[in-house]
Image (cartoon, helix red, strand yellow):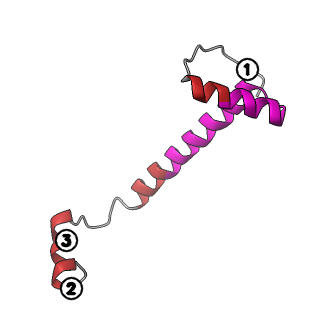
Amino acid sequence: MSLKNRATIYLEAPLHRALRLKSAETEASISDLVNAAVRLSLAEDAEDLAAFRDRAGEPRVSFESVVRDLKKRGKL
């Protein structure tokens, strides 16, 4: 992706150190590593949202009724 924007982020010291070490070991820039991590996180969120949409029509079951059923069947 050729368009880039600058952002200031503040990392906890151990995270920053780990990123610097990984950057040196992999010869990838810290920006590349952060971009990849953010991309992965957003992709996981998109998968979760898709799963919620896919399951929207399923009946809802309360936690209490699940526990009650497990007790009744001797699982708890």
Find the distance from the CA under tag 3 to the CA under tag 1. 52 Å
- Foreground label between 2 and 1: 2
Q: CA distance from mark 2 to mark 1?
A: 59 Å
Asked whether disc 2 touches disc 1, contact meaning CB atoms under 8 Å apart, the reply is no
**Residue appearing at x 15%, y 74% in the figure:** 68
Q: Could you tell me if residue 62 is visible in this image?
A: no
Figure disc tally: 3
For mark 3, give the secondary structure.
Answer: helix
The outermost residue toward the right is 27
Residue 52 lies, with reference to residue 10, above or below; the image says: below
Q: Closer to the N terminus: mark 3 or mark 1?
A: 1
Which label belongs to residue 3? Answer: 1
* Residue that label 3 marks: 67
Residue type, numbered disc 3 = Val
**Near-viewer residue (42 or 13):** 13
Ranked by sequence position, the earlier of labels 2 and 1 is: 1
Q: Are marks 3 and 1 in contact (CB under 8 Å)?
A: no
Residue 56 x %, y %: 34, 58
Residue 47, percent from left and from top: 52, 51
Magenta extent: 18-47
Q: Which residue is mark 2?
A: 74
